[in-house]
Each structure stands twice: as structure tokens, then as C-alpha cells.
Amino acid sequence: CDVKTPDGKPYELDMRGVLKEAIAYAKERGISCDFGTEFEFYLFKLDEDGNKTDVLCDEAGYMDVAPKDKGENVRREICLAIEEMGLCPERSHHEEGFGQNEIDFRYSDALSSADHAVIFKNAAETIAYKNGFYASFDPKPVENQPGSGLHINVSVNDKDGKDVFESFVAGVLEYVRDMTLVFNPTESSFERLGKMKAPKKITCGKEDRTALIRFPATKGEKRFELRSPDGDANVYLAYALLIYAGVSGVEKGLRLEDKEYGELPSSLEEAKRAFTNSEFIKERLSKKVVEAVLLRE
């Protein structure tokens, strides 16, 4: 839904509205984007009173199946439910960590994709609870297990048919440090980055699952996967900033050069400093939105 003030004006802190503004900004410049999300999450058992425990649902590993994989039926039920709600689930499997799962659904335009991400999280949490589990999208809920990411896939289209993909990606790389606070908004976020395939260095690579930006093997399409965000991110705001950064790269004619982009911030405080001091952020987000992001607990 859209949030409005009592006099009918758009509410400034409605992040869905912020995304709609970014979409319009890109459209004025002849650019549109499709987004797809890949959510990783852990399933913890509930006690007899329905409270979360520290006991994971299984000790299965990557792509394991039943009987080792005890989240299979929950994932299936989630997929069936979100399909009835208009989403198109494409992949569902056990991830590397004990009790860790992944469900991916079909890409769509930016606004629909962000809406679908919110719907998915709510559906996953509700259905997991119904089955006696707690679905945790926390970036690092278990110390000695892989963290959970929210991998964002983006494809870029230009109305005049120009190849703007490289410049768009270069724009994301240029400003990713400034945007990290939105992609990784909690202390737990930084316990994940740099460990067990979660990226730390600002790099890109073809089919490289340790790179910040990965170019998947695809047929007839160009897309990239940003692997640093996690499930605590506000998807609407994350998409908006990705659009602004990419369009900026196109307008400036940036190229993917053989240069050092450095590393992502190492802590929440460092991410806040990068966000606060960024001219890019100040240009694209209102002062109230910036303050709201910085005040998030």
C-alpha cells in the first residue's frame, strides 16, 4: 500500500514511495530495471509454548534431501502459499548451514519485486510458525554456521536499446560503500560479511560466488547479482538506491575498470559514517529519510 498524510499527500518516510520516485527518475532517463531476490533463512524449533529455541531444525547441508533435510515440507508449503498470492517460486533447497534454507522466486519490475519480498517474508514466518518452527532472516543467527544473505539480481533495460549495463554496474560499485548501511543495517550484518562466501572486498566476477557482484551464467540476458545485502534490509530503499547508483553510473559514463574499489565497511559505525558523509546519499534521499535510516535500531 501507499502511506499518505491525512491531507492525502505522500508520506515522506514511506519507503515504498521513495522507490516509486527512483523508478520515475530512471524512467525519465530511459532506463528501467527488473529485480529478483534470493532469501536465505534458518529454521529454529519452537518450544511447547511457541517460543523460539536455539535448536536448529536439522543438521543437513547444501542440497540435502529428506530425511536429513527436515525443512523440505515447510519450504514446499511456503512455495504453494506464495504462488496463491501471485508470486512465482522458481527454486527451493537446503542451504549450506544446519537448518538453513533458500527460496527464490521469479523476477519482476522493481515495485512488484519489492512488494513480493515483503509478502514472502511474512508468509515464510507465518507458515514456519504453524509448523512448529521460527524462521530467522537474521544475517548471522548461528556463530559457527554460514550467514544468511538477501541476494539481489538486477537486469537493466534502455528504451533506445543502448548497452548501459556496464555503466550501471560500475555505478553500483562506485557507491556501494555509501549504501551499505541500507543493505546491512544491524550489528549482526557485519558478523556475516567477509566470512563463508559472504563478500567483503568490492569486486565483481563471472560466476564467482565470493565476489560482491556476480555475473551469473545466463542465456540471452545480462544481469548481475549483488551478494552483500541481508534480510534485515528495507527492500524498497535498497532497490531505490541501487537504481539511483546505476543511473548515475550511466549518466557519468563509468566503466568497469581494473582498479581497486576497496572493501565494504567493517562495522555498523563505519557504515553509518560512510552513509552520513556521502554526497550521493545527500543528493538522492531527503534529510528526513537519512535521519530515519540513521536512527533505526
Image (cartoon, rainbow, N blue to C red):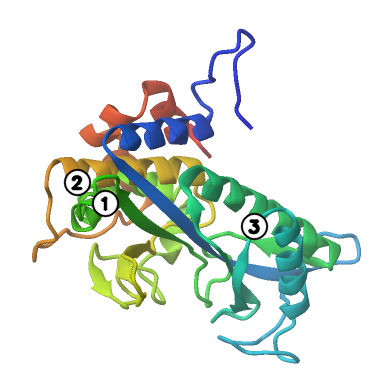
* Outermost residue toward the left in this view: 258
Q: Nearer the viewer, residue 243 or 163?
A: 163
> Which residue type does callout 3 highlight?
Leu
The amino acid beneath tag 1 is Val
Label 2 belongs to which residue? 249
Q: Residue at x 91, y 66 (%)?
A: 48
The residue under the point 69% across, 70% down is 43
Q: Nearer the viewer, mark 1 or mark 3?
A: 3
Separation of marks 3 and 2 at Cα, in angstroms: 31 Å
Query: Helix or strand or loop: what does disc 1 sit on?
Result: helix
**Farthest residue toward the top?**
7
Residue occupying image coordinates x 39% and y 29%: 290
Q: Nearer the viewer, residue 230 or 168?
A: 168
Q: CA distance from mark 1 to mark 3?
A: 27 Å
Residue 53 visible at all: no
Labels 3 and 2: the sequence-earlier one: 3
Q: Compare residues 81 and 11 and report the one nearer the observer.
A: 81
Q: Which residue is mark 3?
A: 87
Q: Nearer the N terminus, badge 1 or badge 2?
A: 1
Q: Which mark is residue 172?
A: 1
